[in-house]
Image (cartoon, helix red, strand yellow):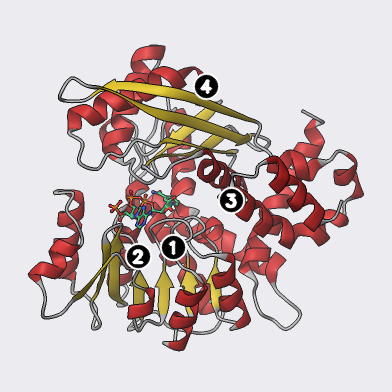
Amino acid sequence: MNVQEFIDDLRSRFPHEPEYIQAVEEVVSTIGDVYDRYPAFKNVNLLERLCIPDRIISFRVSWVDDKGRVRNNMGYRVQHNNAIGPYKGGIRFHSSVNLSILKFLAFEQTFKNSLTTLSMGGAKGGSDFSPRGKSDMEIMRFCQAFITELWRQLGPDMDVPAGDIGVGAREVGYMFGWYKKMTREYNGTFTGKGLDFGGSLIRPEATGYGNVYFLLNMLATRGIDLAGKKVAISGSGNVALYTAEKLLSLGAKVVSFSDSDGSIVVPEGITKEQFDEIFDLKTMYRGRISEFAEKHPDICTYYPRERPWRHVQADIAMPSATQNELDGEDARALLANGCIAVSEGANMPSTPEAIREFQNARILYAPGKAANAGGVSVSGLEMAQNSQKLSWTAEEVDARLKGIMADIHEQCVKYGTAPDGYIDYVRGANTAGFLKVARAMYAQGVL
Ligand code: NDP
């Protein structure tokens, strides 16, 4: 079966899962020649086993809201692959969550975790529950009901969840607490925990910081300096905010943020004081990004229900909100305005058409599975600290994070450099991620 036949077959078996098919197609279309070089892999139908999750757990989550009404959501855990370590991947709470999205995320996670060089398999979970507008007590009751269904499938050597969209320190704390209550065990089953109960320093910052470290590695291949560059960011959650913080500390200018209601564009870039204001608005008050625009109409324009890409003049784009948030038209607008690099904080934020535009223009383009791997890398370091019952300093974790991002970059260069010298980070990341998992699967037999 060739690549196209393989994708067609998958599409006919999972016709209602477009994001999952999109993610598989992107990977399979770049590793076909490597796969062909290993007939032994073909003999055990390894590719199909690698693309279809090991198992999917789905369940109803019933909980009681503050008015005493019983509410029902769907809950899922996709345990994609544990060939190189325990299942590992975040939990997403958002109204858009469905099985297609979680299958794509778990598939991507498997390759990303392989790239980190740490021992972690791939998984993802979540619910169509939206924390937005819910009270703390409602969120706690929901998290407890979610874990009541899921706890049997989790464990420090079995499956270790973390945060993702809609799941931050508060939600991880509630889930970890209930997991502990159900199991009567205190262990490192969750990452992204609070610092007082086993969390790692730098974990909240890791995805954003790691993305900037990856960007620095990419820019260095062309001798480009980050200082003074204008950077467009989307989202204004965990990843977006720590990306911006690190960029500002390195002298870059941050010219946009967004949330699901719209985008702000600040053509001259925000100051550190304005960043602190946005940080507090989003993290302490759970406010909307439009509130910043209302307070600063002199420096800032708000675009309701729009993404920032067509409105910014930026040297660099770092999409950090959600999947498929940057399409072909957006890519052409960014390129026309002088964009020279894209480094993805979100998972699969660029559509296939946008990726083609970036690569055809020969600009630096890093897919999320490489550029945003810093988060799960520090999660891996949190697991290591938990099993040693030790805490490392922020400097130590940050230094390891930098080292891991440099390593991932090196793997991309090794497997992705084209004959003309252009570094195809998609091919590089997919090939490096694939080879490690494939070799492990092959060695372990047909399971
Ligand atoms: P948060 O929930 O902290 O923030 C998400 C941000 O994206 C919010 O500003 C949110 O706006 C916006 N957003 C979410 N959904 C949509 C949508 N459908 N349309 C427009 N905007 C949207 O999540 P994170 O920052 O943790 O995650 C962001 C991305 O990074 C995701 O793709 C995630 O998978 C990826 N990622 C996260 C990691 C982590 O460590 N947290 C690790 C690796 C990847 P609003 O507030 O209005 O919902």
> Which circle's residue, 1 or 4, is located before the other in the chain?
4
- Is the residue 384 above or below the residue 431 in the image? above
Q: What amino acid is found at the position of numbered circle 1 in the picture? A: Glu
Q: Quadrant of residue 74?
A: top left
Few, some or many C-alpha atoms within 10 Å of disc 2 (few <14, some 14-19, many ≥20)? many
Of badges 1 and 2, the one in the foreground is: 1
Residue at 14% x, 49% y is: 285
| Residue 372 can be seen in this image | yes
Q: Quadrant of residue 288?
A: bottom left
Q: Position of residue 170 (x, y in %)?
A: 26, 36
Q: What amino acid is found at the position of numbered circle 2 in the picture? A: Ser
In this view of the protein, which residue sits in the foreground, 405 or 418?
418
- 4 left or right, relative to 212: right
Of badges 1 and 4, the one in the foreground is: 1
Element under disc 4: helix
> Which circle's residue, 3 or 2, is located before the other in the chain?
3
Residue at 48% x, 40% y is: 98
Q: What amino acid is found at the position of numbered circle 3 in the picture? A: Pro
| Residue 186 can be seen in this image | no
Q: Residue 234: which disc?
A: 2
Residue at 72% x, 45% y is: 12
> Which circle's residue, 1 or 3, is located before the other in the chain?
3
> Which circle's residue, 3 or 4, is located before the other in the chain?
3
Write down the residue under mark 4.
153
> Which circle's residue, 4 or 2, is located before the other in the chain?
4
Write down the residue under mark 1.
325
Number of callouts: 4
In this view of the protein, which residue sits in the foreground, 374 or 316?
316
Q: Position of residue 9 (x, y in %)?
A: 77, 46
Write down the residue under mark 3.
18
Q: Is mark 2 within 8 Å of ligand 1?
A: yes
Asked if the residue under mark 3 is in contact with the one under mark 1, i.e. CB atoms within 8 Å, the reply is no
